Amino acid sequence: MKDLTLDNMTDVVISSIADTEDPRLKEVLSIVIRKIHEAAIEVQITHAEWEGLMNFLLAAGNISDAQRNEFILLSDLTGLTSLVDLIASSSSPDASERSVLGPFYVPNAPMIESGGDLIADNEGDPVVALGRVLSSTGEPIPGAMMEFWQNAANGQYSNVDPTQDDNNLRCRMLSNDDGSYEVSTIRPIAYEVPDDGPGGEYMRATGRHCWRPAHLHVRVHADGYEDLVTEVFNTLDKYIEEDAVFGVRSSLAIPFNREPTPDEQARFSHVASPFHMVDFDFVLQPLG
Ligand code: BEZ
Ligand code: FE
């Protein structure tokens, strides 16, 4: 019988998964097991600390349900989600960078025409977001399915706020023949991620706050291109340098305060003045 020791335990466990058929699963598991063992040995983990970790994970499971996945929040707050985005974006350097989907995406939002309005009865500063959907090879992409969602003047998203209509400040629209899009909305505001579970416990223990800088979520799909999930951030927000979930990239951040031109003022005369412009082009990577 072979003795299990601090020196051989990791190799013994990795050998135990030698029959894993899926080669990618085997590679990932071997590396993850090795790193977890290394970390446990490096910090000389105690029983009490191990039990604390198990209870922390249990609490994350207990507070999760069909609407809330605390493990994704923990992934967001520890930068893992953004690492996944950065790895994916590194293979398409000419496309728009990706950023976190977040927990407030809802599929099948109402379709509106480009130029349509999301403001309706919402309070807040009116803005018109506009730009184009382009290929990373430079051509405009007509008919791209764009999905927009954002928070309301109270900071909340409609799917977790009973005071809002289900589809408030959400829409889908197709880009125009020249790839352009336009939508009038309100300026999103800074927002605190849910802090009533293990995610919040982690943030308090590490002396961090839960704020995200104001952002507009956008998802773009066009046949023949990689899907893009991203966010556009307002550089004028006080939390722009300290996003709780590490989603900000300088390529995704602009000031949400451009004055409209006289032509835009006339074209968007249905939007209450004063309003500001948010210019952003979304660049997609061709598949393959
Ligand atoms: C958000 O975009 O609002 C969000 C993203 C990640 C975690 C929590 C909230
Ligand atoms: Fe958000």
Image (spheres, grey):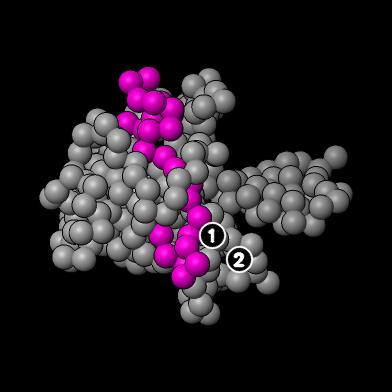
Kindly identify which residue carries mark 1.
144
Q: Nearer the viewer, residue 41 or 139?
A: 139
* Image coords of residue 146 (percent x, y): 49, 53
Q: Look at the image and tell me whether residue 34 can be seen.
A: yes
Determine the image quadrant of residue 23: bottom right
Identify which amino acid the numbered label 2 is placed on: Tyr
* Image coords of residue 227 (percent x, y): 57, 58
Q: Are marks 1 and 2 in contact (CB under 8 Å)?
A: yes
Q: Residue at x 21, y 34 (%)?
A: 123
**Count of number-bearing discs:** 2
> Where does the N terminus fall, quadrant-wise?
top right
Q: Residue at x 50, y 67 (%)?
A: 177
- Look at the numbered disc 2 and give the secondary structure of its residue: loop
Identify which amino acid the numbered label 1 is placed on: Ala
Q: Nearer the viewer, mark 1 or mark 2?
A: 1
Which labelled disc corresponds to residue 225?
2
Mark 2 C-beta closer than 8 Å to ligand 1: no
Q: Residues within 10 Å of mark 1 (few under 14, many from 20)?
A: many
Q: Magenta segment, which residues?
A: 156-181
Asked if residue 170 is among those painted magenta in the image, a careful observer would answer yes
Q: Look at the image and tell me whether residue 134 can be seen.
A: no
